[in-house]
Each structure stands twice: as C-alpha cells, then as structure tokens.
Amino acid sequence: MSGSPVPPVRERRSIPLAVTVSVWAAPLLVLTGFAFVAFVPVLIVLIGSLARTRDTAVRAGAVLLAVVYAIPFAIWQLRPDGAPSLSKDIHPGFIGLIVAAAIALLCLLHGARRR
C-alpha cells in the first residue's frame, strides 16, 4: 500500500441545505412582520425542492407552501386599496396557514432525511 490515505466519500445530500434553511426562514419572516421579504425563501424552497429532491411528498409540501404564500401576496398586489405593506394587509389566518405549511414541510424534510 502506498501510504496516501483515501479521503472518505461524502454522500450527496438528498435535501439541499438552502431548502432547509429557507423553510425555517419563511414563517419566521412572516411572523416578524417581513412578509414581503419572505418570497425569497419561499422561492428557494420551491425551486430547490422541485429541482433537487426526488421525494414527491417534499415536492408537494413545497408547492403547498408556495401556494399558501402566493394567495395573500396576489390579493395584496391586486387590491386597489391595499395596505402599503404585505405584513399589514395579510389576514392572520393566512399567517397561520403559512406557518402550518412550513411546519408540515419541515416534518416531511426530516422524514426524507431519515429514509
């Protein structure tokens, strides 16, 4: 044997780290009053899970989170008398739905990692 150690082979992550961090960030931003900025993590979750994840449950959870976020965002954009901020215009029920969808997606991500 030659003496040069063979580096360990790293397993490719089934769920990208950016997706996991963004799933945590999206409801946190909505809850703290930065609902408009939350479109960035929601978009990262959607694109990252659709492009890099094979688990269909995770993909469905990401689509659910994106749709639940897109509904109040679209209402805010389309209303002529809307508030100057999405955080001021969003209904508390939608905030609860966004948080619930993110928690469900986190559970799905955890389950996908264990498999």
Image (cartoon, rainbow, N blue to C red):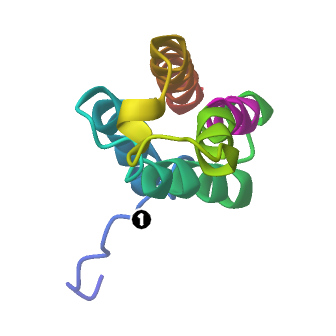
In-image side of 32 versus 43 (left or right)? left
Comparing 89 with 60, the one in front is 89
Placement of 62 over or under 50, stated as above or below: above
Placement of 9 over or under 18, stated as above or below: below
Q: Position of residue 38 (x, y in %)?
A: 41, 47
Q: Position of residue 42 (x, y in %)?
A: 52, 47
When asked about the image quadrant of residue 6, the answer is bottom left
Q: Is residue 13 visible?
A: no
Neighbours of disc 1 within 10 Å: few (<14), some (14-19), many (20+): few
Q: Position of residue 22 (x, y in %)?
A: 40, 46
Comparing 104 with 84, the one in front is 84
Which secondary structure, mark 1? loop
Q: Position of residue 75 (x, y in %)?
A: 66, 38
Q: Residue at x 46, y 20 (%)?
A: 95
Placement of 4 over or under 57, stated as above or below: below
Q: Quadrant of the N terminus?
A: bottom left
Query: Hey, what amino acid is under mark 1?
Result: Val
Q: Residue at x 67, y 29 (%)?
A: 61
Q: Quadrant of the C terminus?
A: top right
Q: Residue at x 56, y 21 (%)?
A: 101
| Image mark count | 1
Q: Is residue 52 visible?
A: yes
What secondary structure is the magenta-colored segment mainly?
helix
Residue on which the image places disc 1: 9
Q: Confirm whether the magenta stretch covers residue 91.
A: no
Comparing 7 with 3, the one in front is 7
Chain part drawn in magenta: 59-68
